Image: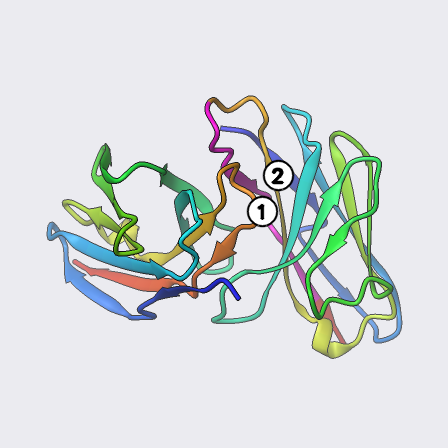
Amino acid sequence: QKEVEQNSGPLSVPEGAIASLNCTYSDRGSQSFFWYRQYSGKSPELIMFIYSNGDKEDGRFTAQLNKASQYVSLLIRDSQPSDSATYLCAVGNNYGQNFVFGPGTRLSVLP
Amino acid sequence: GAVVSQHPSWVICKSGTSVKIECRSLDFQATTMFWYRQFPKQSLMLMATSNEGSKATYEQGVEKDKFLINHASLTLSTLTVTSAHPEDSSFYICSARDPRTSGTVNEQFFGPGTRLTVL
């Protein structure tokens, strides 16, 4: 059984701070890793994906992947109240198939 | 990014009736679509993988006779909840991979979801 784990939160950070979201996965064969943001009552929207070890930056977001530790994280710099949402980590195989979603981490950015 | 639509966005029905939800890829052809279900405060659970022109692949524990999936064209997949009961009330979300994305990573794009309430 493939598992993806996240701290359910809520994670509270002040506006302007860095929010750090973590995700671990059980399947060592996983090749593709995704971060989605989901607002209450809405469907998930893709923030970014990563499939190589190291860091990948996109604007205020940085994804970090460590396959040896089976760990992927998302950093949000200069957090804004509009970033308050549930962040879902998803893990897939080489072609983005067999998606398994984590339970999500609820982030609250306090003004 | 790719656009996926769903219809209806919400539906309320009586117990025992059937409900059909449509998922469309608007600006690309999706050979594969996915159907998820999400209960309140829980994560997405994959129900089935819908393949154009062939039978859907259902996840363990999902009743294929209750959740009928049809993927008749490259832009449309439908999920029919047959003889719906209150415990089927949930947020149903479809997604599709855009084959035009480069490399080996084909991220999934989600539709806006359909909230089903069975009375």
Image x and y of residue A32, in percent: 42, 42
Q: Secondary structure at mark 1?
A: loop
Q: Is residue A63 magenta?
A: no
Q: Is residue B42 visible?
A: yes
**Crowdedness near tag 2: few (<14), some (14–19) or many (≥20) residues, C-alpha within 10 Å:** many
Q: Quadrant of residue B26?
A: top right
Crowdedness near tag 1: few (<14), some (14–19) or many (≥20) residues, C-alpha within 10 Å: many
Query: Where B4 falls versus A81 (above or below)?
Result: above
Given the image, on which type of amino acid does mark 2 rest? Ala
Dots 1 and 2 on the same chain: yes
Task: Examine the rendered structure and indicate whether residue B29 appears above or below residue B80.
Answer: above
The kind of secondary structure element at disc 2 is strand
Q: Which residue is mark 2?
A: B96
Up-down: is B102 above or below B41?
above
Q: Chain of mark 1?
A: B
Comes first in the chain, label 1 or label 2: 2
Locate residue B50, reporting x and y percent.
73, 45
Residue B64 figure quarter: bottom right
Separation (CA) of disc 1 from disc 2: 12 Å
**Rendered image coloring scheme:** rainbow
The question of residue B111 being in magenta is answered with: yes
Residue range corresponding to the magenta coloring:
B103-116
Residue occupying the point 28% across, 61% down: A107
The chain ID associated with circle 2 is: B
The amino acid at mark 1 is: Pro
Task: Tell me residue B54's x, y (percent).
Answer: 83, 40
Q: Taking A11 as reference, is B68 left or right?
A: right
User: Looking at the image, can residue A42 be seen?
Assistant: no
Mark 1 = which residue?
B112
